[in-house]
Image (tube, rainbow, N blue to C red):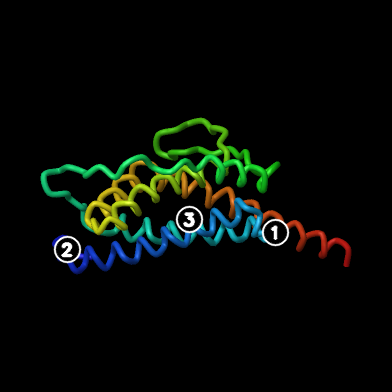
Amino acid sequence: MSDTNSPQDWNALAERVACHVDNYLNGLEAVARGDGGTHTIPLLLLEVSQVILAGAQLGASADVILPDNWEPEVGDDPDLDSVRQGLSERLKVMDEYVEVFDPYKDTEATSYRLSDDLVDVASDLVHGLRHYNQDRPLEALWWWQYSYFNHWGNHAGAALRALHAFVANSRLDVASEAATTS
């Protein structure tokens, strides 16, 4: 995107990001309900990857600046604890993982919960989606971009690495077991 985005450019980007956000939230809620079955982890890997694409589009765009540098109130965000609990129950032993959150600033690994990361991302995305659904695409973009850099981008990236590691390790372990039994 150029440094001088037109309102049409912003609206098109807001529409694309809102679509990714809707898909992420719907997918996360479905997995939390148990709809993913034995495909829970691969489905989460897909959902997180898709929403990170939206984040990359926001990161590659010019800074979104609100008129008067002010964000209108959207009210209280929904309580996502039932989603967090459902994810925690589905993820069980793989919910906790270790991450160096900022490889340029942190020197020690810290323990995190995948269910917390996934819901933290959802919480930030819901806030922007509420702006979008109230016909304020610029405010939605501002919030999504700001919170991508400040919060949800880190959590989504960490979750993606944890999910990828789990899927890759389970597939590679199966491949190495098959090779040793042949």
In percent of the image, x 88 and y 67: which residue is there?
182
Residue lying furthest right: 181
Seen from the viewer's position, the closer of residues 152 and 135 is 135
Query: Dividing the image into 4 quarters, which one contains the N terminus?
Result: bottom left
Seen from the viewer's position, the closer of residues 160 and 144 is 144
The reply to whether the C-beta atoms of the residues labelled 3 and 1 are less than 8 Å apart is no
Quick check: 182 above or below 140? below
Task: Specify the amino acid type for callout 3.
Answer: Leu
Task: Specify the amino acid type for callout 2.
Answer: Asn
Task: Specify the amino acid type for callout 1.
Answer: Gly
Residue 16, picture quadrant: bottom left
Residue 82, picture quadrant: top right
* Sequence-first tag of 3 and 1: 3
Residue 90: % across, % down: 67, 48
Give the residue number, with chain letter if any, for mark 3: 25
In percent of the image, x 61 and y 46: which residue is there?
87
Q: Classify 10 Å Cα crowding around label 2: few (below 14), some (14-19), many (20 and above).
A: some
